[in-house]
Amino acid sequence: MPNVMRGWWLLLVAGVCEVVWAAAIARTDGFTRLWPSLYCAAFIALSLYLLSLAKRTVPVGTAYAVWVGIGAVGTAIYGIVFLNEAAHTARLLCLLLIVAGVAGLKLFSVEPVN
């Protein structure tokens, strides 16, 4: 797999790890519960590590924005689906705008800067 494509896959997985730790953070009870806290910390570390690897072939500004976008949209969807958070039209439209911005960054990113 070409390095640039590998970077985007790493970025996608880093974003999914971002969603996992964000979803798990409530179970840590302010990081006072050991096992949920360790689980959360492991996914934070993995997410940041994968982001750092992706940044090798994806421009840093684009990589960070895409990572944050995946985390924000994924966590909001998690909240809607599993935590019964609001899913009204305006909120969904805002999520769609984030997705459009992330897709635009991917489409218009400058290829590798090494």
Image (tube, rainbow, N blue to C red):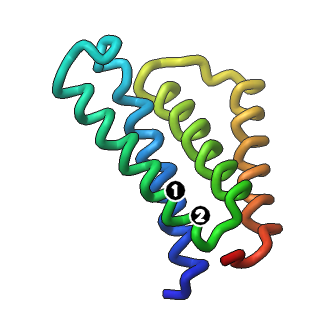
Q: How many marks?
A: 2
Most extreme residue toward the left is 35
The residue nearer to you, when weighing 80 against 64, is: 64
Instruction: From the top left corner, tell me how far across and down residue 88 is, in percent.
Output: 68, 22
Measured in 3D between alpha carbons, the distance from the residue under mark 1 to the one under mark 2, in whole angstroms, is 6 Å
The residue nearer to you, when weighing 79 against 61, is: 61
Helix or strand or loop: what does disc 1 sit on?
helix
Helix or strand or loop: what does disc 2 sit on?
loop
Instruction: From the top left corner, tell me how far across and down residue 29 is, in percent.
Output: 30, 12
Most extreme residue toward the front is 114
Residue tagged 2? 55
Could you classify mark 2 by the number of other residues whose Cα lies within 10 Å: few (under 14), some (14-19), or many (20 or more)?
many
Above or below 91: residue 109:
below
Q: Residue at x 41, y 26 (%)?
A: 82
Above or below 12: residue 83:
above
Above or below 95: residue 32:
above
Instruction: From the top left corner, tell me how far across and down residue 57 is, in percent.
Output: 61, 73
Above or below 50: residue 89:
above
Q: Residue at x 59, y 64 (%)?
A: 55
Asked if the residues shown at circle 1 and circle 2 are in contact, with their CB atoms under 8 angstroms apart, the answer is yes
Question: 32 left or right of 58?
Answer: left
Residue tagged 1? 51
Could you classify mark 1 by the number of other residues whose Cα lies within 10 Å: few (under 14), some (14-19), or many (20 or more)?
many
Q: Quadrant of residue 110?
A: bottom right
Q: Residue at x 43, y 20 (%)?
A: 83
Q: Amino acid at mark 1?
A: Leu
